[in-house]
């Protein structure tokens, strides 16, 4: 099983893994970026996932597409992939379910992910789930769409 298959398996249900499972997909010097922050090295990524696992009741990803985006020299050791997904997140102590669509760019060297960058709408994930602020943002989006 290649690293992309292992990645998809781990992300199927994040709450069923241990941070140590991340060693099977990420390189020691991985750069992991999301709209909130950047994590450098497997230690920081494991710490990030430890915090997520403490906060999440459930965190599952439905992976819709995986595209191999590498072109050019076949001897080049880096391979790029784009993964489209939908995240389903429920935080502990909160019955609110958050569904979020996103895309991840992955660069792979020697069957390990060396670069992981997530693209998603941070407002959709955070701000729209704050009761009053979420109502205002949804109203503004509605007016802009019409």
Image (cartoon, helix red, strand yellow):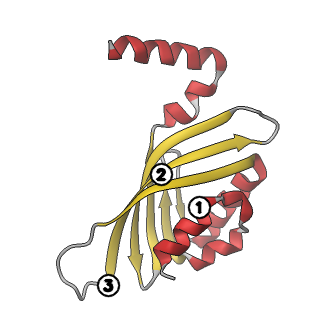
Q: Label for residue 77?
A: 3
Say which label, 3 or 1, has the lower sequence index.
1
Depth check, front residue: 31 or 52:
52
x and y percent of residue 32 in the render? 50, 61
Q: Which is closer to the viewer, label 3 or label 2?
A: 2
Give above or below for 48 relative to 87. below
Q: Say what secondary structure mark 3 lies in.
A: loop
Residue at 74% x, 55% y is: 53
Q: Disc 2 designates what residue?
A: 85
Depth check, front residue: 115 or 3:
3
x and y percent of residue 78 in the render? 33, 78
x and y percent of residue 109 in the render? 40, 81
Residue at 49% x, 18% y is: 138
Say which label, 3 or 2, has the lower sequence index.
3
Say which label, 2 or 1, has the lower sequence index.
1
Residues at marks 2 and 1 touching, judged by CB atoms closer than 8 Å? yes
Residue at 45% x, 63% y is: 116
x and y percent of residue 24 in the render? 59, 79
Question: Left of 12 or right of it: where is 112?
Answer: left
Alpha-carbon span between mark 2 and mark 1: 10 Å
Q: Disc 1 designates what residue?
A: 11
How crowded pointer 1 is (Cα within 10 Å; few <14, some 14-19, many 20+) is rated as: some
């Amino acid at each position: 099983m290649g690293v992309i298959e292992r990645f998809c398996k781990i992300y199927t249900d994040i709450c069923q893994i241990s941070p140590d499972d991340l060693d099977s997909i990420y390189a020691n010097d991985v750069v992991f970026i999301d709209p909130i922050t950047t994590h450098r090295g497997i230690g920081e990524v494991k710490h990030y996932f430890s915090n997520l696992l403490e906060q999440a009741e459930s965190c599952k990803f439905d992976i819709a597409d995986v595209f191999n985006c590498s072109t050019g020299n076949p001897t080049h050791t880096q391979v790029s992939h784009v993964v489209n997904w939908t995240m389903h997140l429920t935080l502990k102590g909160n019955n609110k379910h958050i569904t979020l669509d996103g895309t991840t760019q992955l660069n792979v060297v020697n069957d390990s992910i060396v670069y992981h960058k997530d693209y998603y709408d941070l407002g959709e994930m955070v701000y729209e789930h704050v009761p009053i602020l979420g109502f205002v943002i949804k109203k503004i989006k509605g007016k802009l769409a019409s």
